[in-house]
Image (cartoon, rainbow, N blue to C red):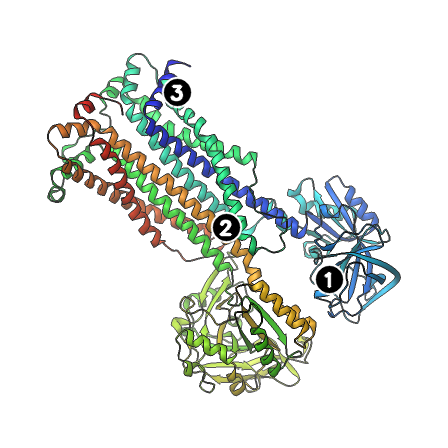
């Protein structure tokens, strides 16, 4: 080791505090880089594992090919691995309750099926030969037919044809046009029961059941992975063209072939759309924040180090040290600190993220369904760790190179005199009188010192400004991400909903069943409602929100069938209304809870509806979602139009056919199928029931949560109105209603409540067991997105904490070291009689100066950075620009607290100094 390197190591050893703070900064920075890359890798692997668990590992599939075609496809050089799912045939499911799914589809699978296709056994085992069968539990839950493991069943298996053409699972059931031909009687032993397989389309006419070793199939579905998945779309088209006579046009993708888009998207191969663009942009902002914080902290440390060693460099230059040696000395110092900081940082990052993911996995476990064996764990990627180390090394070298370049430019004499930071201009160092009056002589002295030594003070102010920017930027990142996820969730007030048709229930049985279900185990609250069909308000332009009106008139609304497209509309617009009637007891309870006038809003003759007019629409040009208010300044309509029941006709909701000038509405002849060749325009008197509304209330979702089961805002161009159910019988007798009752439930333990309601419907309600299939839990569906939001909040707040640590270390390091470098100055002031109180006044002024200047420079830049993050969110959703005022208040108070604490700590040590010793000593 040469003399310069030994000298550098001695300097690091002598300045232990600065060395320690710098190493901590490198450790924190590296840990954060490692954390970000590890989180991305772990979440990506988790999503991949979830997708494989739910839907299999296959990347592409080609449907309904012959035996020779299947063999040729699987042998193609572009295929990495593949299997053939062999369609043996169809058999009638005796006793099946689902009319659109009357068959059992027998399919033969190879032994290695599970490598590519997900078949989740809930009971028993996989088949071992062509006499054994695994059936889907969907046969019982949907078809209302029960089989058990060990049962022997006989199926008449044959070829399914539709209008004489052989049909597969991709072709929906067509009543009256189908036959099962060339049947063969086959006996099977049921050896296992599985969940409904994901490869079975929802519209498939047969329940999938699986055997193995049967070679009688003439139709096959081929599943495979590719050697080069990046070109999978074109490669599948080439396979179709090369080995089959199928048409590979994009329009036939669902019938001819399919690509496992979710899996490929998580693998980073398929495009993820606007939302992925937003996440990538915001991830880039995250990396930028970390780099900025790290460079600031580490640059300050090296800049202070170079300032301390300026005299040393002058002495070294005077005895022959070259610029290269001086530069090498600073870079060697950086590398020594990296050798210690980066490995510890990587290890700390991995341990921190590993522990965090472990506890996050425990937190989100109750929210996840069907994820047995899939856990959120740390996934270590050597490439990601190498990337973290490289970024950290580059960050440190950049931080060290800037002050090193300044050091080598100084001449030996300038370095020895240490006056390169001092700039005295008589006019510019004059202090305002108010400083002397408020802070006294000491404050004026501090102000002059600030002006004559601007570079050092500028470094501290810059550090504070960057700290403000980083903290507010991090808070903005969290806020926008939370709002974007919240907006992507349609607000549902019910945990469980049930729709029951009028064929299964009348008003009396609905009331009876409602009372029974609300008393079931784990059900906390309940309501039931009915909704009117085809209900509208007709508004003038002035009664509609300006931004909503312009958005639709510009043709930017992705929904092209809106009331803005009616004929001869002029300035009038027809707006659909979702009119819901809630059972009286639930509605009255809601009014009382929100301190609304019960007698007014329960009146069945003078109708006063509650109105929600928020709508989330998607832009045709930008594909962004944006929330609108439909009504102008809380305007409430005074009339509502409901489509009448017209004997022998049914209404067609086609806004382009409505004539608002003549008030004519399109009806089609008949009652079952749409027949657009027999449309009749009905005049207002025949088509509409006009019902007057009184003093309704437009409800702000911020102030009033919607009643149970009512959505406060819709992804549609419509207004939501609510009335008591009793108003239906008095004022809406001739109006068309949806042919179903809606039951809504809330439950903390919604899984138990769901099971209780399901068991009641299947066993005790007296209804057909298939009614239980209409039971639905919005909360189960929304929980996956809420879990992502929870994970996002955990990691974002963790990120803010780490950024705060870097910020605090940065401020502490900068201020305390600058104070320590002024030991001679303070010793001189002591020697001429400055008291401890004078020192306190001088330091208080400096603290205020640091804090105020840091905030004045930092806040505007922080708002600009916030605006940049807002624009990155605009790639997916049109959220309003928002300033996190709470975080602004925290950072303002935090800056002053950290500045004063750092100054107090430093001055506590300075006050103990012996002035004579401090004047003699050049080192800290």
Question: Where is mark 3, residue-wise?
Answer: 328
Locate residue 49, reporting x and y percent. 62, 47
Circle nearer the N terminus (2, 3): 3
Image-quadrant location for residue 144:
bottom right
User: Can residue 533 be seen from the camera position used here?
Assistant: no
Locate residue 22, reporting x and y percent. 37, 31
Image-quadrant location for residue 763:
bottom right
884 vs 683, nearest the viewer: 884
- Residue 644, compared with residue 857, is above or below; it is below
Label 3 crowd (10 A; few <14 / some 14-19 / many >=20): some
Which quarter shows the C terminus?
A: top left
Label 2 crowd (10 A; few <14 / some 14-19 / many >=20): some
Q: Are marks 1 and 2 in contact (CB under 8 Å)?
A: no
User: Can residue 816 be seen from the camera position used here?
Assistant: yes
Question: Where is mark 1, residue-wise?
Answer: 204
Question: Where is mark 2, residue-wise?
Answer: 791
| Horizontal relation, residue 660 to residue 200: left or right | left
Q: The residue tagged with tag 2: helix, strand or loop?
A: helix
Q: CA distance from mark 1 to mark 2?
A: 36 Å
């Amino acid at each position: 080791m040469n003399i310069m390197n030994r000298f550098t190591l001695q300097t690091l050893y002598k300045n232990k505090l600065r060395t320690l703070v710098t190493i901590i900064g490198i450790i924190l920075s590296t840990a954060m880089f490692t954390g970000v890359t590890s989180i991305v890798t772990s979440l990506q692997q988790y999503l991949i594992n979830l997708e494989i668990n739910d839907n299999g590992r296959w990347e592409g599939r080609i449907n309904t090919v012959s035996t020779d075609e299947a063999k040729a496809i699987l042998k193609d050089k572009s295929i990495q691995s593949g299997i053939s799912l062999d369609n043996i045939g169809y058999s009638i499911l005796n006793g099946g309750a689902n009319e659109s799914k009357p068959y059992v589809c027998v399919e033969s699978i190879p032994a290695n099926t599970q490598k590519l296709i997900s078949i989740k056994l809930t009971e028993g085992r996989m088949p071992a030969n062509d006499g054994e069968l695994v059936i889907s539990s969907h046969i019982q839950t949907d078809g209302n037919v029960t089989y058990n493991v060990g049962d022997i069943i006989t199926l008449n298996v044959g070829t399914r044809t539709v209008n004489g053409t052989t049909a597969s699972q991709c072709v929906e059931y067509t009543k009256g046009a189908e036959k099962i031909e060339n049947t063969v009687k086959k006996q099977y032993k049921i050896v296992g029961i599985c969940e409904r397989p994901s490869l079975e389309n929802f519209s498939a006419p047969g329940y999938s059941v699986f055997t193995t070793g049967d070679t009688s199939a003439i139709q096959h579905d081929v599943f495979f992975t590719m050697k080069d998945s990046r070109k999978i779309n074109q490669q599948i088209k080439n396979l179709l063209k090369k080995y089959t006579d199928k048409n590979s046009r994009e329009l036939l993708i669902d019938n001819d072939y399919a690509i496992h888009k979710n899996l490929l998207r998580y693998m980073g191969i398929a495009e993820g759309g606007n939302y992925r663009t937003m996440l990538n942009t915001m991830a880039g902002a995250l990396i930028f924040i970390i780099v900025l914080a790290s460079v600031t902290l580490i640059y300050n440390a090296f800049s202070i180090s170079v300032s301390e060693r300026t005299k040393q460099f002058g002495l070294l230059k005077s005895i022959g040290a070259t610029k290269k040696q001086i530069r090498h000395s600073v870079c060697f110092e950086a590398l020594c600190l990296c050798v210690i900081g980066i490995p510890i940082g990587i290890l700390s990052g991995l341990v921190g993220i590993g522990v965090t993911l472990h506890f996050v996995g425990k937190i989100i476990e109750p929210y996840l369904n069907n994820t047995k064996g899939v856990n959120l764990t740390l996934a270590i990627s050597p490439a990601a760790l190498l990337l973290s180390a490289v970024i950290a090394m580059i960050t440190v070298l950049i931080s060290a190179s800037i002050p090193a370049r300044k050091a080598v430019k100084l001449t030996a004499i300038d370095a020895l005199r240490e006056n390169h930071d001092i700039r005295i201009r008589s006019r510019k160092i004059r202090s305002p009188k108010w400083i002397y009056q408020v802070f006294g002589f000491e404050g004026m002295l501090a102000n002059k010192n600030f002006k004559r030594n601007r570079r050092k003070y500028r470094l501290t102010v810059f550090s504070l400004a960057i700290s403000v920017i980083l903290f507010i930027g991090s808070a903005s990142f969290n806020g926008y991400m939370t709002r974007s996820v919240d907006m992507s969730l349609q607000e549902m007030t019910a945990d469980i909903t049930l729709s029951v048709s009028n064929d299964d229930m009348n008003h009396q049985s609905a009331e009876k069943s409602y009372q029974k279900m609300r008393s079931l185990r784990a059900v906390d609250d309940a309501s039931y409602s009915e909704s009117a069909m085809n209900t509208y308000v007709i508004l003038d332009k002035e009664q509609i929100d300006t931004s909503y009106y312009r958005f639709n008139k510009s043709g930017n609304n992705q929904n092209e069938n809106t009331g803005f497209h009616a004929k001869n509309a002029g300035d009038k617009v027809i707006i659909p209304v979702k009119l819901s009637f809630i059972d009286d007891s639930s509605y009255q309870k809601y009014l009382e809870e929100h301190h609304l006038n019960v007698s007014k809003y329960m009146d069945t003759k003078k109708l006063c509806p509650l109105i929600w007019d928020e709508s989330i629409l998607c832009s045709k040009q930008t594909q962004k979602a944006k929330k609108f208010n439909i009504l102008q300044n809380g305007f409430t309509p005074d009339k509502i139009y409901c489509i009448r029941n017209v004997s022998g006709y049914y209404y067609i909701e086609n806004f382009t056919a409505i004539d608002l000038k003549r008030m004519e509405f399109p009806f089609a002849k008949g009652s079952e199928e749409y027949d657009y060749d027999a449309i009749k325009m009905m005049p207002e008197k025949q088509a509409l029931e006009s019902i007057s509304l009184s003093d309704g209330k437009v409800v702000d979702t911020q102030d009033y949560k919607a009643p149970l089961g009512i959505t406060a805002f819709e992804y549609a161009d419509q207004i939501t109105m609510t009335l008591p159910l009793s108003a239906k019988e008095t004022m809406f007798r001739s109006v068309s209603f949806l042919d179903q009752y809606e039951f809504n439930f809330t439950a903390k333990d919604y899984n138990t409540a769901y099971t209780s309601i399901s068991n009641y419907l299947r066993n005790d309600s007296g209804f057909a067991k298939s009614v239980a299939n209409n039971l639905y839990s919005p909360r189960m569906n929304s929980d996956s997105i809420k879990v992502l939001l929870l994970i996002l909040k955990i990691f974002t707040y963790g990120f803010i904490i780490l950024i705060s640590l870097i910020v605090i270390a940065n401020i502490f390091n900068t201020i305390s070291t600058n104070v320590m470098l002024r030991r001679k100055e303070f010793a001189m002031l002591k020697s001429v009689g400055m008291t401890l109180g004078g020192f306190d006044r001088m330091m208080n002024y400096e603290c205020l100066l640091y804090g105020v200047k840091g905030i004045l420079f930092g806040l505007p830049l922080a708002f600009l950075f916030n605006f940049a993050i807002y624009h990155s969110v605009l790639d997916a959703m049109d959220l309003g620009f928002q300033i996190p005022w709470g975080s602004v208040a925290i950072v303002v108070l935090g800056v002053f607290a950290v500045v004063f604490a750092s100054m107090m700590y430093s001055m506590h040590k300075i006050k103990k100094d012996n002035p004579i010793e401090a004047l003699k000593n050049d080192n800290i």
